[in-house]
Each structure stands twice: as C-alpha cells, then as structure tokens.
Image: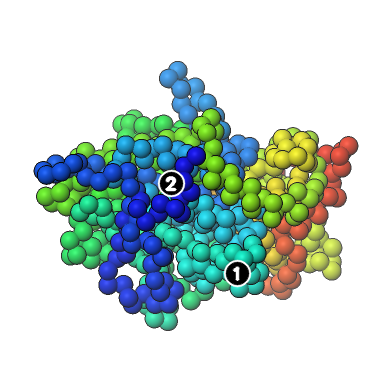
C-alpha cells in the first residue's frame, strides 16, 4: 500500500502561484498551504552535468467529474469504444478508486508530470458528495494530486462565497463541520477563473492563472469557464459576478505570462464541442465529410493566440482528441475526457529548454479508459466508506420501486423515459388548486443527472429506488414554480428548444402527459417545432389563453436559453423537484406493483 497522499506532498510537486496577483482580494487571500513546493517526486532531471535540450512533460487531464466518487451507475457509467470490426462496445468505467489508480500508474516513469482539470469537478453531484456540499470530492481531488483546475459553471451553483470556501477551507456556514474534530481544509490546488470578475471592483474572483515549475521547466495554466455561465446557473449563483469572453481573456493573460518569461502555456476551458462519433477512440482528425468536431470550442480554439500550446476543454461531456488550427494556421491539440471520471487524457508536451516553449509539432495526446478491472486505490476506498457511513441513514431510505431501468442521462433520445416520469411528478404534485393549479409541466434535460437503475446499488435489493438514487437523478433540489403563460408564450418556448442559443445544440424539454407535438429535425431553427401540431389534452394550444405551467426555478428564470419561460406571471412557489419526484415514486409504486418505464410518445420526431 502506498503512503497516503498527504504524507509526501512537499516532496512531490512544485506549483508556483502566479506572481503579482496580490490584488485578487480576500476570496483567494493565499495559495493553499504547502502548494508552493509540490512536485511529483518521481526523480529529478537526467543525471548530473549536461541536460538534454528537450524534456517531455506529461499532462494528465480530465473534466466534468461532478462529484462522482463512486462508479456512475447504468448507461451513464459506460464509455463507447469502436472495435476493429466497426462494432461499438459499451465499457463500464469511472469511479475515483479507479481514476486514482489510472493516474498513479500513468505517472510512473514520467519525472515531469502535471495533472489538470477542465472544470465542473463539483456540482450536480450524487448524494455521497452533494449531501456534504462536495467536501468529499475536494478531499478526493487532493488525494488524486490534482495540480490545477478551471472553474466550470457548476462550481457557481452555490455562489461565489461557497466556491471560495471550497478553495480556502472552513466549515459550512449553515451546517457546520460534518466530522467531529475535523475542519474542512479546502482544495490544495488552485481553482482558476480568469474570465470571472467581481462587478463592484472589476477584479478577478479567483486566480486567472498559475505556473507549474520543476527543475527549470515552467508551464503556465490559464483557466476560464464559458461566458454563458449566467444563462445556465441560477441567478443567486452568479450574483455580483461578470463573465467575460473566453478568447479575449485567455489572450490577455497569455500575453502577461509571455512577458514574465513563461512561454509554455495550456488553457483550461470549461466549454467544449461534439465530435462526429461518441466513441472515445474516434479519430477526430479523420478527413471524411461530416467528420471532426463541431460546437463552440471550434471558434474559441481558432481565436486563441498561438502563444497557447494546448487546450484542455469540458462542459459537453464528450470524448475527443482533435487538432484545430490556431490563428496562424498551425494545428493545436484540443482535448476532452468525457465526464464522471470515466476517461483521462495523457498528453506529451515536449519542452525546449532553450526557448522555454513547447515544440508543437511533437505534441501527442490520447484518451484512456478508467477501467473497473484494475485495482482500487485503497485510500479512495477508505474515503468513500467514511463518507458513506455519514450519509447512510438518509441515503438508504427506500422511496419506491421500478420494474426495469428508466433511462434519463443515459438516453440520447429527445424524449427520455425518466424525463416523462419527472415531468409527470411535477404536474401531479402541483395540479391541485392550492398547490398552483398546474396544467402542464416542463423539465430541462440537463437537470436529469443520472438514470434510475433497476440493479441494486447497495444492500437495498433490485428495483428499490433509494433516496440516494433519487437525489443522484435530481441533485439541485430546485424549488418548483407555477406561473401564468399565454399559449403564444408556450409555443415560443417550445421553439426556443431548437432556435437562438439552442439552435446548434437543441435542448428538448421533457413534457408532462397530455402535451403532444411534432419535432421535424429535417427543418432548421424554430420551424423544427411544427406549430400546428402542439396540443394539450388533444386540443390545439390557444395563443390568447392563459395556461398554468409548472417548472423548476431555474427554467422559470429563463435559464438554458428559454427567455419565454422567464416571462411568467402570478408565480406560486411549490415544493422542491426532489420532493415531488419522491412523492410520485411513493404514490405510483409498491414492491409488488413497481413503476414501469413509461412510453415515449409525447414528441413525434421526424429525422
């Protein structure tokens, strides 16, 4: 068994805080203790005397962990791999016990190794982490020897003050310390948020960049989240903050690093794209028509200064290792490692000691599966067991029964079986006149964070849905709203699923029973929603009539690119989405009559 990570930290890594950032303010009053002298101590240079001109630096990276300490269940825990014969195989992957082993194995024989992440390490987390405001995940990341991460949009779910606590430590302001005699220490790696400033002062919320150093080798890391974070996080989460253009911000700090003599630069960007194939081993640079990668990261990559040598990305939960030309036309590596710790990326950066820069032509990168067939890291098993004991009284309580898997996150269809269950639960809970009088309910697909899996996750038995499993599906605990919207606004909202900010990557709302319409994907923009087909309980939507509509507070605030839903009036605030979900499971299932996956016949899709 290896020594616990904390014991050898000082000898292991060197991570210098970016100089001259004293102005950042109280949020990041100091680098984490001990962070200045952390280097993976697998051995120094190349012996005495003459140093070779180049040295290979290993960059290990991952993104969108979302507090998945235990292996993610069901289809959400699989990675797609294309076989030599062209068939696609689903391989179970992920879980920090395996991620730790993968990273530690990969580092062997690499004296220069740095580990970075692309954001969303926490937020929308399963109960094991979410119940404790993600302290278990930060503790696990410390143990994984993470050197640096960008912030993602989910790091703002609980606001800037809570993000600062995750960085700097201290017990939760409301719930206090979770373990007797133990104070939460915070992250011993820096969170970078170069494009997030405080509205009042204009100063960065957190460090914009940091510099990793070892034996004279220096690599700068700049971290940004997507500029559109305020559109996908609750208003409270981003209160008092301003989010700036990713390209302009990275270029600004790349110039600053360059002036300080740091010529090797990696950008950590919480924004991503979609490769033409969902297989992790797809050749993203294959030249066929329709091949490659699309999405926001392409334009971002094309705009970032050639001073930046590689881009580690995230947010879209996709797996890719692509090259995208920089503004000078030279190819540059852009990577993403799926989500939930199922993959990690291993990139070789060849560092030229004479120029202090990366030799771009020799950058190599590949994604690797975090298989569940390798040994578990004992320190991570102990961490999970410790927090599971604290969570058990709440987590293991049965809420209902299901007869088979009900797919949500793992479904790629526009209408998801679990989406229907959630929307129906919201409608049923809020339909009574005194609860809001809802006639229809909408659920945002991104808020469904997992599948309901029939196989037991613990000792509860197959088919039992525990509180922990229900929480993993709906971890935000959003309060429900019921509002007045006109029929015209309803139609506009449905059109906004496939137009405006959602045109390139549609966000199809999950709808409660009774609402039906046709989605014609052969058309473009708003026309994809065939207006004449939209009906509620068999009757065409009347543009002039007022309807009572249920949705979570995030959607009711116009989130996810649905400004029409933000125009609601006569608001009534109801129970939380999780409470309604659990109440529905209790009302519609028993051990002898479990809930079956519902039909998906509300949205007729033409492709």
Extreme right residue here?
592
**In this picture, residue 358 sits left or right of residue 441:** left
Percent from the top left, x then y, of residue 235?
56, 70
The residue at the point 47 percent across, 61 percent down is 187
Disc 2 or disc 1, which is closer to the eye?
1
Residue 27 visible, this orientation: yes
Percent from the top left, x then y, of residue 564?
59, 64
Dot 1 crowding, Cα within 10 Å, few <14, some 14–19, many 20+:
some
Residue corresponding to mark 1: 172
**In this picture, residue 591 sits left or right of residue 72:** right
SS at badge 2 = strand
The residue at the point 48 percent across, 49 percent down is 4
Dot 2 crowding, Cα within 10 Å, few <14, some 14–19, many 20+:
many
SS at badge 1 = loop
Mark-to-mark CA distance, 2 and 1: 27 Å
Q: Mark 2 near mark 1, Cβ–Cβ under 8 Å?
A: no
Say which label, 2 or 1, has the lower sequence index: 2
Percent from the top left, x then y, of residue 40?
34, 48
Whether 554 is drawn above or below 420: the answer is: below
Q: Which mark is residue 62?
A: 2
**In this picture, residue 384 sits left or right of residue 252:** right
Picture quadrant where residue 350 is located: top left
Q: Nearer the viewer, residue 280 or 521?
A: 280
**In this picture, residue 265 sits left or right of residue 26:** left
The residue at the point 46 percent across, 22 percent down is 83
Whether 20 is drawn above or below 593: the answer is: below
Q: Nearer the viewer, residue 72 or 517?
A: 72
* Position of the C terminus by quadrant: top right
Residue 308 visible, this orientation: no
The residue at the point 75 percent across, 39 percent down is 459
């Amino acid at each position: 068994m290896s020594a616990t990570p904390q014991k050898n930290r000082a000898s292991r890594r060197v991570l210098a805080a970016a100089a001259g950032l004293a102005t950042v303010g109280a949020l990041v009053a100091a680098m984490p203790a001990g962070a200045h002298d952390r280097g993976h101590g697998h051995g120094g240079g190349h012996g005495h005397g003459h140093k070779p001109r180049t040295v290979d630096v290993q960059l290990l990276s991952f993104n969108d962990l979302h507090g998945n300490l235990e292996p993610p269940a069901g289809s959400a825990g699989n990675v797609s791999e294309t076989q030599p014969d062209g068939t696609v195989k689903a391989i179970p992957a992920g879980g920090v016990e395996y991620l730790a082993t993968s990273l530690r194995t990969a580092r062997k024989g690499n004296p220069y190794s740095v580990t970075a992440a692309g954001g969303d390490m926490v937020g929308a987390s399963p109960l094991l982490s979410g119940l404790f405001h993600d302290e278990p995940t930060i503790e696990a990341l410390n143990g994984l020897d993470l050197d640096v991460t960008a912030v993602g949009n989910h790091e703002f779910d609980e606001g800037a003050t809570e993000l600062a606590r995750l960085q700097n430590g201290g017990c939760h302001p409301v719930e206090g310390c979770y373990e007797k005699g133990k104070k939460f220490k915070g992250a011993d790696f820096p969170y970078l948020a170069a494009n997030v400033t405080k509205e009042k002062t204009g100063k960065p919320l957190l460090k914009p960049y940091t510099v990793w150093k070892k034996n004279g080798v220096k690599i700068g890391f700049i971290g940004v989240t997507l500029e559109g974070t305020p559109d996908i996080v609750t208003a409270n989460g981003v209160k008092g903050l301003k989010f700036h253009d990713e390209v302009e911000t990275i270029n600004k700090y790349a110039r600053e690093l360059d002036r300080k003599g740091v010529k090797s630069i990696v950008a950590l960007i919480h924004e991503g794209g979609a490769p033409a194939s969902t297989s992790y081993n797809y050749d993203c640079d294959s030249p066929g028509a329709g091949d490659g990668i699309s999405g926001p990261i392409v334009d971002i990559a094309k705009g970032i200064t050639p001073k930046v040598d590689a881009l580690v990305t995230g947010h879209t939960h996709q797996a890719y290792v692509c090259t995208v030309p920089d503004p000078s036309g030279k190819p540059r590596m852009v990577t993403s490692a799926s989500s939930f710790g199922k993959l990690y990326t291993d990139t070789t950066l060849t560092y030229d000691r004479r120029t202090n820069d990366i030799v771009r032509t020799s950058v190599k990168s590949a994604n690797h599966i975090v298989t569940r067939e390798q040994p578990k890291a004992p320190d991570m098993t102990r961490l999970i067991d410790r927090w599971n004991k604290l969570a058990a009284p709440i987590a293991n309580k049965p809420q209902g029964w299901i007869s088979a898997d009900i797919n949500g996150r793992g479904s790629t269809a526009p209408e998801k079986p679990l989406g229907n269950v959630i929307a129906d639960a919201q409608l049923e809970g809020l339909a009574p006149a005194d609860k809001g009088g809802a006639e229809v309910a909408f659920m945002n697909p991104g808020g469904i964070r997992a599948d309901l899996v029939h196989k037991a996750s613990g000792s509860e038995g197959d088919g039992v849905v525990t509180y922990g499993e229900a929480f993993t599906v709906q971890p935000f605990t959003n309060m429900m709203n019921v509002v007045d919207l006109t029929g015209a606004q309803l139609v506009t909202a449905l059109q906004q699923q496939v137009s405006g900010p959602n045109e390139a990557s549609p966000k199809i709302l999950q709808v409660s029973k009774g609402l039906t319409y046709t989605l014609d994907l052969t058309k473009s923009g708003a026309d994809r929603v065939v207006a004449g087909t939209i009906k509620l309980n068999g009757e065409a939507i009347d543009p002039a009539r007022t309807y009572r509509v249920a949705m979570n507070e995030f959607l009711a605030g116009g989130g996810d690119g649905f400004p029409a839903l933000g125009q609601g009036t006569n608001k009534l605030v109801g129970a939380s989405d999780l409470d309604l979900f659990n109440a529905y499971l209790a009302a519609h299932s028993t051990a002898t009559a479990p809930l079956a996956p519902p039909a998906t016949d509300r949205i007729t899709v033409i492709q």
